[in-house]
Image (spheres, coloured by chain):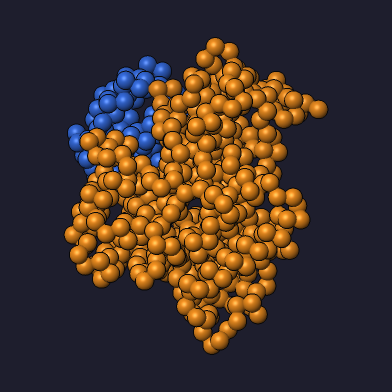
Amino acid sequence: MTEDQVQQIVIDIINEIAPDEDTTGIKPEVNLRDQMDLDSMDFLDIVMELRKQHGIEVPEEDYPELASLKSCSDYLTPKFNAK
Amino acid sequence: MPSSLDQQHYETVIIGAGMAGLAAGIRLALAGKDVIILERHNASGGLNSFYSQAGRKFDVGLHAMTNYVPKGTKGTPLTKLLRQLRIPYDALDLSPQNCSRIHFPDCQLGFNNEFAFFEAEVARAFPTQIDGFLALAEEVRTLDAFNLGSMPSSARKAVQRHISDPLLEDMIFCPVMYYGSAQEHDMDYGQFAIMFRSLFFEGFARPLDGVRVIVKLLQDKYRSLGGIRKMKCGIQKIHTSGNKATTIELDSGATITADKIISTAGAVETARLCTDQPVDAESDNIGHLSFTETITVLDKQPTDFGWDDTIIFFNTAERFRYARVEDELVDPSSGVICFPNNYQYGEGRQLDEGFLRVTAMANHDKWCALNEDDYISQKSHWYDELQKVALSLLPKPKNNLNFEDHRLAKDMFTPRTVRKYTGHLNGAIYGAPNKIKDGRTHLENLYLAGTDQGFLGIVGAMLSGISMANLHVLQGD
């Protein structure tokens, strides 16, 4: 799986858990929180959906790795490819 | 006879199918957890429920949903909770209030869902206090309600730093306390801030069909996610071993086990279920504030009488007293009048009948000590007294309409009713005076959610269920 595909998976999850947020034109390098109204409860849901939909586990100490789309793909792509 | 639940194991058991329990259940079911909600009664909703009598549906609890914000407003409690529960905004069918009022002797302040209107009202009635009021509002807007830092924890003291007129102070405290304070006379400043924001910065709204819309929405969502709910399923005991809860014993005698338990039964009530606690555990944290409420059904709309307000918070005494009722069954000197018809439901949408609800503080022990005949006659007596108070405060009916001639039905709940349906000791509507903000108990796998965890109102109750499920079950899972 490519980094772009992983970023799309994260965008799909955000669309699902925060349907009122506009995810078009998200800048991959910029923190998601600075571009959208997401709080720690929303990040918990991103983790929850990664587990439910894709069987990917993100331990609590790694939550900061999900800060931006780029950091998400850096962190998650190896996990997807290791499955 | 042991039920089918006997010997079952669940990842999480939730005690109580009120707003908090259902919201916690939805979170856990969303995460794919194996969860069951156990409810003693046959109806969901707990304190905020509904019933039918002679073919008519009555709401209990909800006068108004506080924390109302228009669709699309970001970062507020209502928006957060809908997102967490994955419920669309429109499903709540919220209609905003018309206008509400704080009614004291010789002084009235109107407020609606626009803070600027309340601000103008304070400036009109208290021209020398407006700067202090605005300073208070600004402080409350930005306060971290769960970490007061160097601020006074007494809300009275904190407010007095900004407002020197005791009349304005009491007028602000009256609605804030009536809509959520479990403490007498004073409240925690953080809790004051949460309530102030939910009433004055955000506002009031209601679904046309009342609280049942919200309860049904939560139930349906929970069910659609595969959550299990058992009604008429009271808890007899929580058995413990060391610092863990091990087994839940039901009224039926059946036993079930769980990795974690979230209880919405109340802090003291939950402690007393545990086999390692004395039967009178935590007796210093039992609430003492209970209420009575009358409901009158009219064959006309309240506006036909000239009654246009949504909610009226009233006090007829020299100082506003928010405390247990000592000598009488009811303290009619302050309370809340509510007209569920007076919301902006939109063209052609209105409740078929007129409703008038009057709430006042009441003495739990005295109501519960009455024998059945006295209970019925006292209900009738206090119904009349509270209508008298309400009619004395409301504008004189238009067109000489006589209230009595247009009454179709009446009903009344008392602290005895509250006790029966919520299980709260003393019929304490808002639960224990000292809130357990992290939801932890003396047992490592037993947590609290709901009223006694310290969020207020129905939005607060749901947020409590969400945040406790997140914090104690889902986070770091």
At x 40% / y 33%, what residue is drawn? B437
x and y, in percent, of residue B177 in the image:
42, 51
Viewer-side residue, B181 vs B322: B322
Quadrant the C terminus of chain B occupies:
top left
Name the side, left or right, on which A83 lies relative to B17. left
Q: Is residue B374 above or below residue B5?
A: below
Residue B112 pos. (x, y %): 36, 65
Identify the residue at the far right of this view: B1
Residue placed at 69% from the left, 35% from the top?
Answer: B233
From this viewpoint, which residue is outermost toward the bottom? B399
Q: Colour of chain A?
A: blue
**Vertically, is B434 above or below B180?**
above
Provide residue B262's location: percent of width, then percent of height.
Answer: 53, 30
The quarter holding residue A11 reads: top left
> Is residue B116 shown above or below A60?
below
Q: Nearer the viewer, residue B285 or B136?
A: B285
Note whether residue B419 is visible. Answer: yes
**What number of labels is visible?**
0
Say which quadrant the N terminus of chain B sits in: top right
> Chain B is shown in which shade?
orange
- Please tell me in which quadrant of the rendered image residue B405 appears: bottom right
Residue shown at the point (75%, 29%) measured from the top left = B252
Residue A43 at x, y = what percent?
A: 35, 33
B303 left or right, relative to A26: right
In this picture, is B187 found above or below B304?
Answer: above
Query: What residue appears at the point 31 percent right and 39 percent down from the top-left corner?
Result: B153
